[in-house]
Amino acid sequence: MPLSREEVEHVASLARLGLTTEELSLMQDQLSSILRHIAVIDQVDTAMISPTAQVGSVSLLLRADVVAASLPRDAVLANAPRQQDGFIEVSAILDVVNEETDS
Amino acid sequence: MSNGAAEITALTAAEARRALDARELSAIELTRSYLARIDRLDDEIGAYLHVMRDVALAQAETADRRIAAGNSEPMTGIPVALKDVLCTIDAPTTAASRILEGFRPPYDATVVNRLRRQGAVFLGKANTDEFAMGSSNENSAFKPVRNPWHRDRVPGGSSGGPAAAVAAEMAMVSLGSDTGGSIRQPAGFCGVVGLKPTYGRVSRFGLLAFASSLDQIGPFARTVRDAAMVLQAIAGHDPFDATSSPEPSPDYSRALTGDIRGMKIGLAREYTADGMEDGVVAAFNSAIQRFGALGAETVRIDLPHTEYALPTYYITAPAEASANLARYDGVKYGSVETASTLRETYARTRGKGFGPEVKRRIMLGTYALSSGYYDAYYIKAQKVRTLIKQDFDAAWSKVDAIVAPTSPTVAFPLGARTDDPYQMYLADVFTIPANMAGIPGVAVPCGFSEGLPVSLQVLGPAFAEATILRIADAYERTESWAARRPQIAAAG
């Protein structure tokens, strides 16, 4: 199923991915082509089949509730592009009222 | 030791272990030989993104002291390359992506930590497709890797660096990750052994996550025995990875008896594909004769949903990747492109930091998970995944293992598939089903076509690594493919 330009732009917005005009066009063509190939799975009858999201044999292991050392704060913050007073610094978001909300 | 440097790097890890413990060879000598070879050849190959020279030399000195004190473990003094998706506290970790350029992890991946504790020597961080997404290593943001057997061919991917490093004797063994074939396929293209363990056998803590229901870490080596030795060192439960299994690991080396008489080996008609090369078919068929000569019984089996594994994978893996890669937002680590709003900062940082294939997969995965398409794509794929797993479950009631070609072709030319993403995806058509089912697989060389290596893979039930290694080792003993090494001349 070919994707419309609007759909590609919407998906890029959901993914918080800034794409150039050229990238959006290429993405529209390539994703449409990939989805055409993928559509072959529609041939499989899965009416009575339950989904498998995880093939691991381990289910919900709980660790012992004991206090252990965690990473030193400086080591964790060392990679942050901006930091202040021992915290990662992030631009304000609460005063931005006109950003769309995604559904 | 009387051998020259060239012969030293040709040793297997098992041979080196013996020589190190017998004090015929020092870890420092071994490490220097590898570093010298990297200096001489890696401009041609591009297997490393970062050579850990000082770390390696210090580790080698420590290893020699440890060996002298009689405290060596199997990996003590063994030179290893680490795929650059594994966190290392003493070297940058980039996933071959601009978005992580300069990132220094505050901790080691568990597999790195386990090798470190055994006294292994880290030669460096090996090249990969960006975030392990690719089948040719051409998606590295920094440089491609060239196949040691033919400089104009790809090494396979995504673990092209770890595979090429071992093939070119620029590492004795290496670690890669396999989400849809990223260990087995490059091992095949480069003519080395590559093992994808069972999902849950090896901890992924500190592996930069790509598709969490599929990712698994495993070794590259020049022999099955060496791969077994590395698996032994990295396998086992880890409290930091809730998906790692508490199932105990058997002694993998002891499983390598050379005796596979009476074992049942499944051959599935579905492991043929349009465009499968004649040379691959010929090499595979003659390998199958060997299994018969070794006393194994070959059994025809059906895996009817095999053709759906690739399309199912290209929904599942991108969907999981789109969620996993949401963390790269320019706030906590990595590169940042600051804009006036946080949301625009995210978009610009990610738009600039990610390469084309990573963007494609984030888009595909986001689409498959988005409102209105979730059932048609993501849930549908999970249901087909159930059928793929059931195919294998049914097979294990008839056979001990399955043998199949690793790839339908030998290594293809650089640039041959970069214009058509789906053609590139098809390079993994034979390796993806094992990831979908969570089962282990080991790729071993099984001949040559056009002067390039051909490979077969042995697949087994979950946690049957000992079985598939035993079969692969028995086959390897009958052939001399591993003894054939690529001839690499440094650029003049």
Image (cartoon, coloured by chain):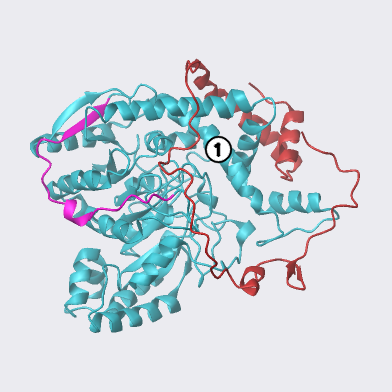
Q: Quadrant of residue B145?
A: bottom left
Q: Is residue B45 left or right of residue A39?
A: left
Q: Mostly what secondary structure, the magenta segment?
A: loop
x and y, in percent, of residue B460 in the image = 28, 38
Which chain hosts label 1?
B
Which chain: cyan?
Answer: B
- Is residue B256 on the magenta stretch? yes
Label 1 Cα crowd, 10 Å radius (few <14 / some 14-19 / many 20+): few
Which stretch is magenta? B244-268
Q: Quadrant of residue A74?
A: bottom right
**What residue appears at the point 63 percent right and 21 percent down from the top-left corner?**
A1
x and y, in percent, of residue B269 in the image = 28, 24
Tell me the element at label 1.
Answer: loop
**What residue appears at the point 28 percent right and 31 percent down from the top-left corner?**
B278
x and y, in percent, of residue B132 in the image = 50, 49
Which chain: red?
Answer: A
**Of the residues shown, which amino acid type is indicated by label 1?**
Asp
What residue sits right under mark 1 in the picture? Answer: B419
Vertical order, B317 against B303 (above or below): below
| Residue found farthest to the front | A65
